[in-house]
Image: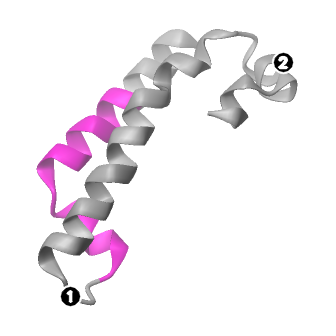
Amino acid sequence: MLYSLAPETKALHNTDNIIFTTPFVVYCVFRYLMKVQEKNRGSGPVEIILHDKVFCLVGLLWLFSLLFIS
């Protein structure tokens, strides 16, 4: 969230609206933590992320929202 509020980020993307993509990022972080605790095994983060359809869907929504805002 602090990254999206930084003046350098605003200047790089020419918008103040990147803060609106924060809920997607927060949701994915907490979903990843839930999946790690749910399975309780040592599989890698890439396996957990790519095998979770909801995680991939939210990631695509984040990407589309970022492209739409910028």
Q: Is residue 55 magenta?
A: yes
Pointer 2: what residue? 11
For residue 61, side relative to residue 41 (left or right): right
Query: Could you say which is closer to the camera, residue 11 or residue 36?
Result: 36
Which mark lies nearer to you, 1 or 2?
1
How far is disc 1 from disc 2 in space, using C-alphas?
A: 42 Å
**Type of the residue with mark 1:** Arg
Q: Residue at x 23, y 61 (%)?
A: 34
Mark 2: give few (<14), some (14-19) or many (20+) Cα within 10 Å. Answer: few
**Pick the front one: 5 or 66:** 5
Asked whether 34 or 47 is in front, the reply is: 34
Badge 1, how many Cα within 10 Å: few under 14, some, many 20+?
few
For residue 14, above or below residue 55: above
State the residue in front, 64 or 44: 44
Instruction: State the residue at coordinates (70%, 34%).
Output: 2
Q: Which residues are magenta?
A: 44-62
- Determine which residue is flagged by label 1: 41
In the displayed structure, does residue 70 sit left or right of residue 6? left
Residue 59: x and y, percent? 33, 40
* Screen quadrant of the N terminus: top right
Q: Secondary structure at mark 1?
A: loop
Residue 2 higher or lower than 41, as above or below: above
